[in-house]
Amino acid sequence: MAGYVDAVGFLKLGGVFIAFMSGNSTELGAGLGTGRGVELIRCGLVILTFLAGVVAGALAARLDRGRDRQTVLAVESALLLIASLLQMYGHEMTAISVMTLAMGVENGVFQRHGEVSTALTYMTGTLVKMGQEMASALTGGPRFGWATHFLHWAAFVAGAVAGGAGYHRFGMQAIWAAAIWAACATLAAGWQPTNETRSAGGPPAAAP
């Protein structure tokens, strides 16, 4: 989902990411160094909007610690639905802002003790972990410890491929697919064990 939405936003904005803030931070710094005001304003606003989304996602996770993953996904689904409706009525740049908020929120899906345990919208850390696991495998460690990180990276890239193809064919209307996808993920999260249940090692005991 992150790769898909980021690709749509990247193509619409002509080279600014809405999920990957490392690239935007580099562009912001380059703009500061060269005095290019357009990059400063554009990247600065995207970074601030993404940060607001991260804060919103963290707060949503705290609303219901028993259903934190589903709550965060529900907020993300609502934002992507709003973005879909906004672009449908011609407010495409406002839709991009709401999509950026949704990408910030998404980082709250996997949390442990209030900290993000799995990054969803940026891949640098995933690739570093994959490389470290590969080095471990070459020196006698688990042979396929890197596979999970590879699948995470591959899923992001596959989403970006789908997002690029969707934008090429449908323009900003492609975001409807992400809104539906997020809604399905929200429903699916309701069937998974909660974080509290996972940390306790199983379902709570029935009352006598």
Image (cartoon, rainbow, N blue to C red):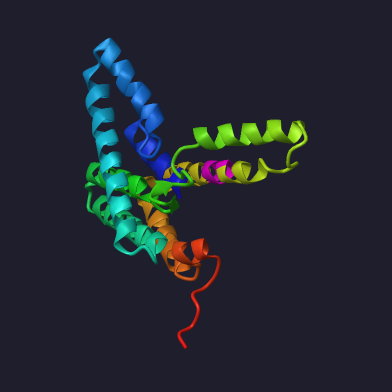
Image location (x, y in percent) of residue 85:
27, 56
Number of numbered discs visible in the structure rendering? 0
Above or below, 22 against 186 in this view is above
Quarter-of-image position of residue 7 = top left
Which residue corresponds to the image point at 22% horizontal and 47% vertical from the top-left?
91
Which residue corresponds to the image point at 22% horizontal and 26% vertical from the top-left?
41
Q: Is residue 91 left or right of residue 10?
A: left
Above or below, 43 against 94 in this view is above
Instruction: Magenta stretch: give its range.
Output: 153-158
Q: Residue furthest front?
A: 208
Q: Is residue 155 magenta?
A: yes
Q: Is residue 127 left or right of residue 20?
A: right
Q: Residue furthest bottom?
A: 208
Image location (x, y in percent) of residue 162:
50, 46
Which residue corresponds to the image point at 37% horizontal and 45% vertical from the top-left?
171
Above or below, 16 against 38 in this view is below
In the image, 111 versus 11, the foreground residue is 111
Q: Residue furthest top?
A: 34
Q: Is residue 158 left or right of residue 171?
A: right
Image location (x, y in percent) of residue 145:
68, 43
Q: Is residue 29 magenta?
A: no
Which residue corresponds to the image point at 39% horizontal and 66% vertical from the top-left?
66
Image location (x, y in percent) of residue 89:
22, 53
Magenta-colored segment: predominant secondary structure: helix
In the image, 31 versus 91, the foreground residue is 31
In the image, 192 versus 88, the foreground residue is 192
Quarter-of-image position of residue 22 = top left
